[in-house]
Image: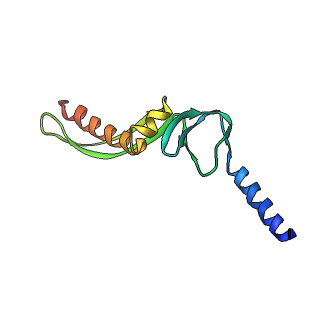
Amino acid sequence: MYPSILLTIAIFVILLLASAIRILREYERGVIFRLGRLIGAKGPGLIILIPIVDRMVKVSLRTIVMDVPPQDIITKDNVSLKVNAVVYFRVIQAEKAIVEVEDFLLATSQLSQTTLRSVVGQSQL
């Protein structure tokens, strides 16, 4: 065979193998999908995937700090308030965070805004 063909094949194989290896930190989990079907959450450490067949979504398990946009809220006694809030949360089950909710960050933000309006709206000043 020609050396250029062997070199091309060798580079392709090396790139394919390199794409199969992932390293997850202590605070991360990887949710693995094989051909679209959930395999499970893996990590931390060295994760070996089947190239082209497996897909991994990383999820951080650290505490996330999210600023809730200022809300104009009317209380129970019709007083208008502008309220700021901060939400602290953590992902406990990485599989559920990825599979059961389309975007868990956006969902958490929307839920916190709705809850803030509800709680402050029931208060009297």
Position of residue 86 in the picture relative to residue 7 (left or right): left
Q: Residue at x 27, y 39 (%)?
A: 114
Q: Residue at x 48, y 30 (%)?
A: 93
Q: Is residue 62 visible?
A: no
**Location of residue 25 (image quadrant):** top right
Task: Tell me: residue 91, above or below residue 68.
Answer: above
Q: Position of residue 3 (x, y in %)?
A: 87, 69
Position of residue 13 in the picture relative to residue 65 (left or right): right
Q: Residue at x 70, y 54 (%)?
A: 16
Q: Is residue 10 visible?
A: yes
**Location of residue 62 (image quadrant):** top right
Task: Tell me: residue 13, above or below residue 123.
Answer: below
Coloration of the structure image: rainbow
Q: Position of residue 108 (x, y in %)?
A: 38, 39
Quarter of the rendering occupied by the C terminus: top left
Number of marks drawn: 0
